[in-house]
Image (spheres, rainbow, N blue to C red):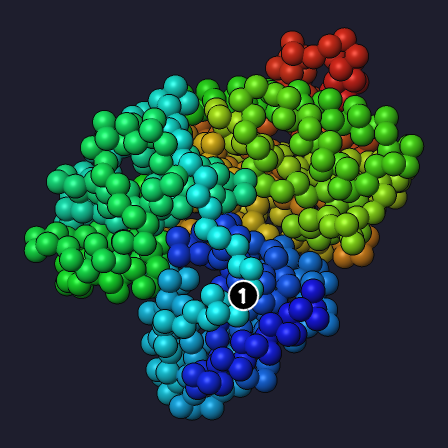
């Protein structure tokens, strides 16, 4: 890839020189500010060779850089080798921001370019202000990729489909009503939705436009007078058209959204989330003084699952756990043959899950990292990197599925043979942090940043740490990563509220040796009310054993051992009814008390 990247960067620079552009910033997102995007918008990966989900490339006339976070440090270093791109590690002391770096390498009077459709209004506005202070110009309408990207993938035209109330638990009509009430409280009378998962949830529609995320590419305009879905007409079936008509939702072409915003009638006060709406779209609104900026009114209600959604999660976890039992039995039997590789692990796991009822697909590409590859947090095996899985050391498997009634995300690190004392210690320290989150009781209003330390302090005591978050929100048959809540060191004002589903996934990564992560999904639930107020806790939803062979039991307290035994008992009780006798026997051994 490095050779291709060099050629592509050279071509880009020729165009930049012709237009007197000194630097071009290329994010890894799309016009909807998505974490994962359709292939058409993966320009950052095309130009640099780095295909992680998070990262931004910058090309100047004589230098190039790639900024990404700790999940991708090792992967980016490998994929950028031999290219023009220097890796900048975000979150590490001394690493300059993109703006800081550009202000150092460019002269005053230089011009930086972006495609304003690929940056949120907030990002682009702050960028413009910063560069102005450095006497650097920012132009926001530069998009060279149609010209230089040969055989660029087309935008997907696969149909969207109706997501029935049987699974969603609430009609689109009710959701729209509640959302518009929130918009009215903010002093607006209309709403522009750009985030694909928010539109899918609000309108009870789903799609297949982004790998692993069941969303369709579209925009939505909602008001009491008018509801419009801007979408490619080829994506609308007769059934979906009828459903949308019944919901009083009109259809318009996807590429007509700018024209519509430019011609909004007087009296429309349009509510926009500037962090989730791209710069070009906001600037298309003719009456800028009629915009009301604020946080999206969709994210919070979407994150608080209703009873139907919660029941769906629980049911999906049972089927997912049963598929995992079959897979891990297969793994134990096959690893000694020498025929198992990281890629076959991912393929076989997908095969077992696909046999389960209501299975739609993976919720993200399986991360199967054996040995040193386990230390690459978001590792994805390729034919070039694929290695055999042997009967020694650790295998880390982070995987998940999309079922019609719920989304799963689970990580297990398993011992395939004898472990060193240090490996067992590290595994147990991670487990202790996992249990600390799982058993946490906290006052109403507690934020993720206030409990993140519970997962880390056992590692910190040994001079260890991990640089990713401890937990992310999870959508209901939607994106496996969703907000607004999370559990991480960085402050986030959103509290952990009953009904939210969040991951619990501490880990530790020893570069060049091994990685360990233990992940379950947890549901925030009411716990008790005392004279000191209301308290919440977590219910663990994920159902699959944690590998006892990797535990140094001397490091566990009696309470931690009791939690693990109770968890394993629950796993057996929930999963065994759907298993055959051999599978039950395997699960019985895997969940036997310590």
Q: Is residue 110 above or below residue 139?
A: below
Q: Residues within 10 Å of mark 1 (few under 14, many from 20)?
A: some
Residue bearing mark 1:
149
Q: Is residue 552 visible?
A: no
Who's the residue at 44% across and 43% down the image? Answer: 157
| Residue that protrudes farthest toward the bottom in the picture | 108
- Provide residue 492's location: percent of width, then percent of height: 42, 51
Q: Is residue 192 visible?
A: yes
Q: Quadrant of residue 582?
A: top right
Foreground of the two, 429 or 54: 54
Foreground of the two, 421 or 571: 571
- The C terminus appears in which quarter of the rendering? top right
Query: Is 174 left or right of 13, judged from the image as shown?
Result: left
Q: Secondary structure at mark 1?
A: loop
Query: Is 589 left or right of 242, judged from the image as shown?
Result: right
Who's the residue at 73% across and 48% down the image? Answer: 381
Who's the residue at 69% across and 64% down the image? Answer: 1
Foreground of the two, 292 or 327: 327
Query: Is 135 left or right of 545, judged from the image as shown?
Result: left
Q: Quadrant of residue 94?
A: bottom right
Report the number of discs. Answer: 1
- Provide residue 482's location: percent of width, then percent of height: 46, 43
Q: Is residue 235 above or below residue 468?
A: above
Q: Is residue 560 above or below residue 452?
A: above
């Amino acid at each position: 890839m490095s050779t291709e990247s060099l050629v592509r960067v050279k071509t880009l620079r020729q165009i930049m020189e012709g237009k007197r552009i000194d630097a071009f910033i290329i994010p890894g997102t799309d016009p909807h500010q998505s974490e994962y995007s359709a292939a058409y918008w993966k320009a950052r990966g095309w130009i640099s060779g780095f295909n992680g989900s998070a990262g931004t490339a910058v090309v100047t006339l004589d230098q190039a850089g790639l900024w990404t976070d700790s999940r991708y440090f090792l992967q980016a270093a490998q994929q950028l080798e031999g290219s023009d791109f220097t890796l900048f590690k975000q979150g590490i002391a001394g690493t300059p921001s993109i703006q800081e770096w550009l202000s150092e390498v460019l002269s005053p009077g230089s011009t930086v370019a972006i495609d304003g459709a690929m940056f949120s209004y907030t990002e682009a506005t702050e960028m413009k202000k910063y560069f102005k202070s450095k006497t650097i110009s920012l132009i926001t309408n530069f998009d060279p990729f149609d010209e230089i990207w040969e055989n660029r993938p087309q935008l997907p035209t696969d149909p969207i489909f109706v997501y029935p109330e049987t699974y969603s638990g609430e009609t689109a009509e009710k959701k729209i009503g509640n959302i518009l009430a929130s918009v009215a409280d903010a002093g607006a009378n209309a709403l522009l939705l750009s985030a694909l998962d928010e539109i899918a949830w609000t309108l009870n529609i789903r799609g297949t436009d982004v790998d692993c995320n069941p969303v369709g590419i579209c925009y939505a305009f909602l008001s009491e007078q008018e509801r419009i879905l801007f979408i490619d007409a080829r994506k609308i079936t007769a059934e979906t058209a009828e459903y949308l008509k019944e919901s009083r939702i009109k259809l318009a072409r996807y590429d007509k959204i700018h024209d519509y915003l430019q011609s909004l009638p007087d009296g429309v006060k349009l509510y926009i989330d500037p962090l989730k709406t791209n710069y070009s779209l906001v600037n298309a609104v003719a009456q800028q003084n009629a915009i009301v900026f604020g946080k999206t009114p969709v994210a919070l209600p979407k994150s608080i699952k209703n009873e139907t959604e919660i029941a769906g999660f629980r049911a999906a976890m049972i089927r997912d756990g049963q598929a995992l039992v079959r897979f891990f039995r297969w793994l134990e039997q096959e690893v000694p043959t020498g025929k198992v590789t990281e890629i076959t692990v991912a393929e076989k796991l997908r095969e077992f899950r696909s046999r389960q009822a209501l299975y739609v697909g993976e919720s993200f590409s399986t991360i199967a990292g054996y040995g040193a590859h386990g230390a690459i947090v978001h590792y994805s095996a390729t034919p070039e990197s694929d290695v055999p899985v042997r009967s020694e050391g650790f295998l880390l498997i982070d995987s998940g599925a999309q079922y019609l009634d719920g989304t799963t995300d689970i990580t297990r690190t398993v011992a395939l043979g004898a472990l060193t004392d240090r490996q067992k210690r590290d595994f147990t320290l991670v487990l202790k942090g996992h249990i600390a989150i799982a058993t946490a009781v906290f006052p109403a209003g507690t934020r993720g940043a206030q409990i993140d330390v519970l997962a880390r302090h056992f590692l910190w005591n040994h001079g260890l740490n991990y640089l990713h978050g401890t937990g992310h929100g999870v959508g209901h048959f939607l994106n496996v990563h969703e907000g607004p809540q999370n559990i991480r060191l960085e402050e986030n004002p959103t509290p952990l509220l009953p009904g939210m589903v969040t991951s619990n996934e501490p880990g530790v990564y020893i570069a060049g040796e091994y990685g360990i992560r233990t992940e379950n999904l947890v549901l925030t639930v009411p716990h008790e009310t005392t004279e000191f107020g209301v308290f919440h806790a977590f219910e663990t939803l994920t159902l699959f054993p944690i590998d006892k062979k990797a535990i140094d039991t001397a490091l566990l307290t009696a309470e931690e051992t009791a939690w693990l035994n109770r968890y394993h008992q629950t796993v057996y009780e929930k999963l065994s009814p759907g298993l055959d006798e051999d599978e039950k026997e395997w699960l019985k051994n895997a969940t036997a008390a310590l």
